[in-house]
Amino acid sequence: MSTLTVGEFIELSDLLNITEEDISGRSRNEEVAIAREVYWYCLNLRGLGYRRISRLTGRRKQTISSGIRTIKNLIETNHPLVEPYKNVIEIFVSTANQLNPII
């Protein structure tokens, strides 16, 4: 499993334009909720499991699982809600793989 540095966490939240409060918060605002779920999705792509993401963000494991599943479905169906985040996901994953290749 690849580990994330503090800098990578900050980079990801900056790219998503989401604050620490938004990540661990309970806002149901669509823009914040989608960004939060994309954040979880990116962490999961880097090898963090639902339980670990849950501990990092203060959310239940089932919530993390549901959010990641939602983002996967939105990406697969090319839903307009995730369009602004596709580049962020690609940038984060490719940058992370260059820094810490997952073998």
Image (tube, rainbow, N blue to C red):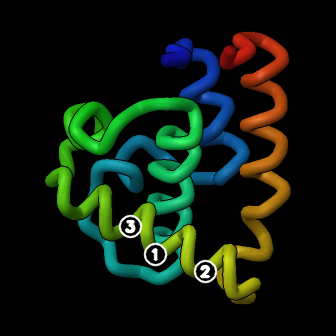
- Spot occupied by residue 17 in the image (x, y as percentages of width and height): 64, 53
Mark 2 and mark 3: Cα distance apart in space: 11 Å
What's the residue type where badge 1 is placed?
Thr
- State the quadrant of the C terminus: top right
Instruction: Identify the residue at horizontal 76%, vertical 23% (top origin).
Output: 97
Mark 2 and mark 1: Cα distance apart in space: 6 Å
Secondary structure of the residue carrying tag 2 is helix
- Quick check: 80 above or below 24? below
Q: Residues within 10 Å of mark 3 (few under 14, many from 20)?
A: many
- Residue toward you, 89 or 17: 89
Asked whether the beta carbons under mark 2 and mark 1 sit within 8 Å of each other, the answer is yes
* Pointer 2 residue: 74
* Pointer 1 residue: 70
Instruction: Identify the residue at horizontal 32%, vertical 69% (top origin).
Output: 66
- Residue toward you, 55 or 51: 51
Asked whether the beta carbons under mark 1 and mark 3 sit within 8 Å of each other, the answer is yes
Mark 1 and mark 3: Cα distance apart in space: 5 Å
Instruction: Identify the residue at horizontal 83%, vertical 41% (top origin).
Output: 91
* Pointer 3 residue: 67
Instruction: Identify the residue at horizontal 73%, vertical 50% (top origin).
Output: 89
Splitting the image into 4 quarters, where does residue 2 fall?
top right
What's the residue type where badge 2 is placed?
Leu
Q: Residues within 10 Å of mark 2 (few under 14, many from 20)?
A: some
Q: Which mark is residue 87?
A: none
